[in-house]
Image (cartoon, helix red, strand yellow):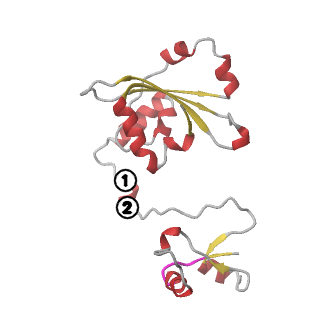
């Protein structure tokens, strides 16, 4: 399968990653340093999975191969041979698969650190929240305090930071005013 590369790491694909490791005995992921399909501007990975995983086995063998380009993949004489010399890695529940592309020593160090009993997840120490990402470079999103500091009054407008703020099919000016009491983002 050709899949978007973000499926290796995004939270919403965690269930898919878990299902793959439960279903298949062997998984091979091939990543590319350059875009394989430049016209769609989407990083992709090739996912090869086979062998029904027997019940009671610990986890799937996962092998990763990173190539420069699709041309390098086509130039390989024997893909099976290339994969046979790769170390097998294993995924744990909740693990993002981008770490599977690390070198064997880096992966082992990360794996050991994540299993350390004194490890404290960042979410227990600090509040982690998703920011706003746009593909537009013609405007910037700033905190209201920054707007005041830079004297951007008249040049900035308040924005909705996330669609989750919209609680019904109709979002009125009163709803927006209520939202603004809880957020401090503006755009200029």
In the picture as drawn, the residue positioned furthest to the right comes out as 138
141 inside magenta stretch: no
Callout 1: SS = loop
183 inside magenta stretch: yes
Q: Nearer the viewer, residue 141 or 115?
A: 141
Image coordinates for residue 106, horizontal then vertical, percent? 47, 33
Q: Is residue 113 above or below residue 159?
A: above
Specify whether 93 is left or right of 46.
Answer: left
Camera sees residue 31: yes
Q: Nearer the viewer, residue 3 or 99?
A: 3
Q: Is residue 66 above or below residue 43?
A: above
Specify whether 159 is left or right of 136.
Answer: left
The boundaries of the magenta stretch are 181-185
Camera sees residue 95: no
Whether label 2 touches label 1, CB < 8 Å: yes
Q: Residues within 10 Å of mark 2 (few under 14, many from 20)?
A: few
Image coordinates for residue 126, horizontal then vertical, percent? 41, 63
Q: Which residue is mark 1?
A: 121
Q: Which residue is mark 2?
A: 125
Residue ID at (66%, 20%): 74
Image coordinates for residue 15, horizontal then vertical, percent? 39, 44
Q: Nearer the viewer, residue 129 or 175?
A: 175
Image coordinates for residue 128, horizontal then vertical, percent? 45, 62
């Amino acid at each position: 399968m050709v899949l978007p590369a973000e499926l290796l790491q995004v939270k919403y694909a965690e269930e898919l990653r878990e299902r793959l490791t439960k279903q298949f005995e062997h998984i091979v992921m091939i990543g590319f340093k350059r875009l394989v399909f430049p016209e769609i501007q989407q990083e992709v990975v090739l996912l090869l999975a086979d062998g029904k995983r027997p019940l009671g086995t610990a986890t799937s063998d996962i092998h990763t191969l990173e190539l420069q380009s699709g041309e390098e993949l086509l130039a390989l004489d024997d893909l099976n041979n290339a994969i046979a010399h790769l170390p097998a890695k294993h995924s744990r529940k909740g693990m993002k698969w981008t770490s599977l592309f690390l070198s064997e020593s880096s992966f082992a160090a990360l794996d050991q650190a994540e299993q350390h009993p004194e490890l404290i997840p960042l979410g227990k120490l600090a509040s982690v929240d998703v920011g706003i990402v746009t593909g537009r470079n013609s405007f910037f999103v700033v905190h209201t305090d920054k707007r005041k500091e830079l004297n951007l009054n008249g040049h900035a407008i308040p924005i909705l930071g996330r669609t989750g703020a919209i609680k019904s099919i109709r979002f009125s000016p009163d709803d927006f005013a209520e939202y603004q009491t809880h957020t401090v983002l503006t755009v200029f």
